[in-house]
Amino acid sequence: MSQKPNVVIVGGGGCGAQVARMLSKSLKQEEYNLILITARPYYTHLPAWIRMSVTEEGHLEDRAHITYNYLFKNGNGQLVIGKVVSITAEEGDKGGSVTLESGEQIEYSVLVLTPGSIFEGPINIPDNKKEMMEHLRSWRQKFADANDIVLVGGGAVALEYAGELRDMSSTKRITIIHNQDMLLNDAYPKYFRKDVYRDIRKRDVEVILNDSVDNLEISEAGTIQTRNGRKLIADLVVPCRGGKPNTGFVTLVPGTLSDTNRIRVAATLQVMKYPRILAGGDAIEWDEQKQVAKYNDHASVIVSNVIDILKGKQPNGLYKGCYEMIAISNGKSAGSTYWQIFWGPTFGDFVSAAMKSKDLFLTWTRKSLGLSS
């Protein structure tokens, strides 16, 4: 590394990749080293993983695993493939270093943390490409072979799996188990949650509410038991309980992480007590739903404030939150969409399919990472 100050980003997902691209346009190559550290050698478009882990139709893996070759504008940036295991930093206006699993240390003048989430089941994606393809083929086979599928969790992941599985087969028995009295959560209005319930039931998907499954292992008799004691026939159980923040490497002072292990940030998205460390995406403690559609706004605030910090100025970019919006595909040609503006309109199959279900935001995502389509 040269003696130019390093601006280091940890995590190349939905927020980190946008930060890297924006900074590559803004930082002068002769003054700073821009370094993106990420565990995978390609960007993974998670919204497409649900469909492509169910079916090989369309070969979505060819478009949903996106090369970083065009991410940095004019080549202004460096990609490091590896996992960060710890951060060395002093409180206050000082830089530090990150340590990789390999033992390599990389110093930073400014650090951006966008490590994303860790998931279960089919979307617990291996970092190695060979292992990832084996994982993908394995889940496709599991879904093809199963006749009685139980989806544990009643959020968007479970709903989208139910839709894709029903597209695959009209005869498989599909059951969603959710621990609340309505699908999704109370970030969304009851009328929308009722609409989502109605739409998924129309596709002959059973929904069990106010219950959960603690032990995902299927018994020798081919059943699982819910927390309330109900026994269900199952030959495949799929955890869809949402992600956990990938913050095990955040070795900073106690209190940096919340009780749920998310990174505490100010409105400037600076980490508490560490003005030269910023964070965004899934891993931050912020009262909003974790969705990649919001992370362009996170990235804009982070980039503005990184530039201010490098200039010795007080950061003045503030993240004010985003309207809640969700588009849930129900197979390839149906879905439900909610948009929290004015009266909070909802949209059904036609709009939802046009917005998400057909393309899964793949074209937009590829263009945002520097590809033409």
Image: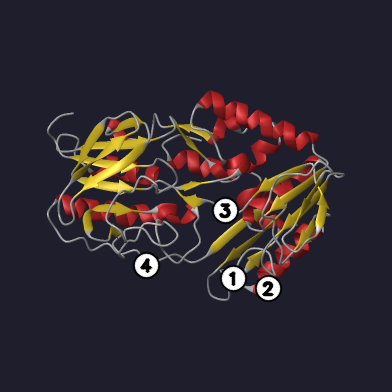
* Residue 59 visible somewhere in the drawing: no
Say which label, 1 or 3, has the lower sequence index. 1
The answer for how far apart the CA atoms under marks 1 and 3 are is: 15 Å
Q: As shown in the figure, which amino acid type bears the numbered disc 4?
A: Lys
Residue on which disc 1 sits: 186
Give the answer, above or below, for where 268 lies relative to 5.
below
Give the label on residue 320, or none: 4
Between residue 25 and residue 171, name the one nearer to us.
171
Instruction: Rate crowding at label 1 as few (under 14), some (14 to 19) or many (20 or more) other CA atoms within 10 Å.
Output: few
Say which label, 2 or 3, has the lower sequence index. 2
The answer for how far apart the CA atoms under marks 4 and 2 are is: 26 Å
- Callout 3 secondary element: loop
- Callout 4 secondary element: loop
Task: State yes or no: discs 4 and 2 in contact (Cβ < 8 Å).
Answer: no
The answer for how far apart the CA atoms under marks 2 and 3 are is: 23 Å
How far across and down, in percent of the image, does residue 324 sit? 52, 65
Give the label on residue 159, or none: none
Task: State yes or no: discs 1 and 4 in contact (Cβ < 8 Å).
Answer: no
Say which label, 4 or 2, has the lower sequence index. 2
Residue on which disc 3 sits: 242
How far across and down, in percent of the image, does residue 23 sit? 28, 44
The answer for how far apart the CA atoms under marks 1 and 2 are is: 11 Å
Say which label, 1 or 4, has the lower sequence index. 1
Between residue 24 and residue 150, name the one nearer to us.
150
Give the label on residue 191, or none: 2
* Residue 298 visible somewhere in the drawing: yes
Instruction: Rate crowding at label 2 as few (under 14), some (14 to 19) or many (20 or more) other CA atoms within 10 Å.
Output: few
Q: Nearer the viewer, mark 2 or mark 3?
A: 3
Q: As shown in the figure, which amino acid type bears the numbered disc 2?
A: Tyr
* Residue drawn at the location 79% of the way across and 41% of the way down: 235
Which image quarter: residue 171?
A: top right
